[in-house]
Amino acid sequence: MSSAIFTRLMHSRAFGTGIGLLSLLACIFYFFGGYSTPLEGDKGLALPSADLWIRPGLGDFCAGMASLGITTAIMVMFNKVYNVLRSMSWLYIALFGMMMAATPNLATQFYTGSVLTVVAPACLFLLFSCFKQPGQTRHIFLIFLMLSLLTATQYCFAVYIPVFMTGLAQMRVFNLRSVTAAMLGIITPWWLLLGFGIIAPDSIRMPSFVSIFSEIELDDTYMLLIAVGVTTFAMLTCYILNLLKTIAYNAQARAYNGAFTLLALVTAVAMCIDYRNIISYVPLLNFSAAMEITHYFSTHRAEKSFIAIYLLIAVYAALFVCQTLI
């Protein structure tokens, strides 16, 4: 086969879904092989954090897999509705699947990271629908309502409130009407929770900060940090290489790309600052990286570009093997 054929293959639906299914089978093997270590601890500010919503076991595993499936579906919708990749490619499914398989202990259970990786892309999808549509106050209200409500379960959701407030400016809808809708969305969940007596003012607490080294085994922690490092490096490299290309896009495409980039960069920075809570950001980092890397390789289809992707997938596969078979 020629290099061009390999390059076309990695962007095909068959490749994306095939690698995605292999990563799913890897997660199933990891869970039923007894390798999974349940995450413990309540990190909620006023309500229980997501790792306490479902008891560890098969239901917890299915919920975690379902959250990743929903995220994948949102990724597909992004390209179908908003054409964010500017080209037809299914590579992001393969990348996201392998990135999650490289951190199988997080992929095989339902916790805050599982919720964040569904909610943040869903909010981004709603945000894109507001481009030069200041009348879409319902979508704006819903974005900030979800983020504010979930902040009661884990403070990491609050990190993204400024991101989406900035996103209003990126979508050319930052005005008094939209800001009012955003503020109402932030206030409403807490007003309802306090007003209906679901929580009491004295029940709002600071979460217990626990180091990741006490959450999971030391060897798994090293594998996690290596996976995060590889993903972050690949994402930032592709972002830098994409800069000159995105400058030439029209205003709408630049706004979409800017919102994606801001979400990705804030996630990377949050992981560095809030390192004790790093596991909550990993799935969203994988989502952002999969989209950013696919964006670069879908618009730069050099004949031998497949080599970098195949090597990256091989690294993630090796990380999975190190956590199971070795």
Image (tube, rainbow, N blue to C red):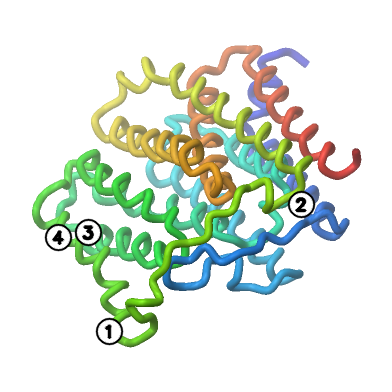
Which residue position holds label 3?
A: 182
Q: Tell me, for residue 27, which label it has, or none.
A: 2
Q: Is 173 above or below relative to 64?
A: above
Query: Which residue carries the number 1 mark?
Result: 195
Q: Are marks 4 and 3 in contact (CB under 8 Å)?
A: yes
Place of residue 89 in the rendered image (x, y in percent of width and height, measured from the top left): 55, 33
Identify the mark nearer the N-term, 1 or 4.
4
Dot 1 or dot 3: first in sequence order is 3
Marks 1/4: CA distance?
21 Å
Type of the residue with mark 4: Thr
CB under 8 Å between discs 3 and 2: no
**Nearer the N terminus, badge 1 or badge 2?**
2
| Marks 1 and 4 in Cβ contact (< 8 Å) | no
Q: Locate residue 82, reporting x and y percent.
A: 38, 42
**Helix, strand or loop at disc 1?**
helix
Nearer to the camera, 234 or 203:
203
Q: Residue at x 69, y 36 (%)?
A: 15
- Residue at the image point whose x is 18% and y is 50% from the top: 133
Q: Are marks 1 and 2 in contact (CB under 8 Å)?
A: no
Element under label 4?
helix
